[in-house]
Image: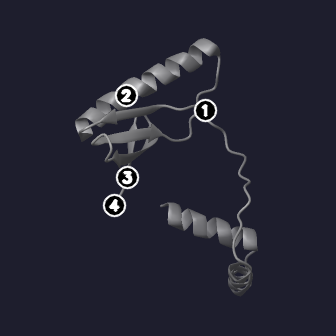
Amino acid sequence: MNNTMTIGGHQAVIQFDPEIGMFRGEFLGLNGGADFYADSVAGLVAEGETSLRVFLEMCAEKGIEPVRRYSGKFQVRVPEGVHAQAVTAAAARGVSLNQFVQDAIEQAAR
């Protein structure tokens, strides 16, 4: 089940909030919070477009870059045994541990 949608060229994750009986959308990869609520897919699209437009207008007014930039670096903590297995699997494939992890993340993110 895919719980994301693209609105205005930006990805948003969608979750159901049982407390209010509505779907909540939150844009990913922006330099600030831009969320929206609706009770239908059509409503999510409309509310998402409005939320994104307001967010982008505010960024333009304040001279803020709206899209978050990523460095490409992050630290991952795994159990010692998983680390050892990953080193072995990477060596067996003839790649670095970094390349092995990058390949696994790319495959899982598809």
Q: Which mark is residue 49?
A: 2
Q: Which mark is residue 57?
A: none
Mark closest to the chain's N terminus, 4 or 1: 4
Kindly state the secondary structure of the residue where label 4 is placed: loop
Q: Amino acid at mark 2?
A: Glu
55 to 18, vertically: above or below = above
- Identify the residue position indicated by label 1 in the image: 31
- Residue plotted at (66% across, 39% down): 69
Packing grade of label 1 (10 A; few <14, some 14-19, many >=20) is: some
Kindly state the secondary structure of the residue where label 2 is placed: helix
Residue at the extreme front of the image, as rendered? 19
Circle 3/circle 4 CB separation < 8 Å: yes
- Residue plotted at (35% across, 45% down): 17
Q: Amino acid at mark 1?
A: Asn
Circle 3/circle 2 CB separation < 8 Å: no
Question: Where in the figure is residue 93, as x and y percent of width and height?
Answer: 68, 83
Mark closest to the chain's N terminus, 1 or 3: 3
Packing grade of label 4 (10 A; few <14, some 14-19, many >=20) is: few
Kindly state the secondary structure of the residue where label 1 is placed: loop
Q: Which mark is residue 3?
A: 3
Q: Amino acid at mark 4?
A: Met
- Residue plotted at (43% across, 42% down): 12
Mark closest to the chain's N terminus, 1 or 2: 1
Marks 3 and 4 sit apart, C-alpha to C-alpha, by 6 Å
- Identify the residue position indicated by label 4 in the image: 1
Circle 1/circle 3 CB separation < 8 Å: no
Marks 1 and 3 sit apart, C-alpha to C-alpha, by 21 Å
Quarter holding residue 48: top left
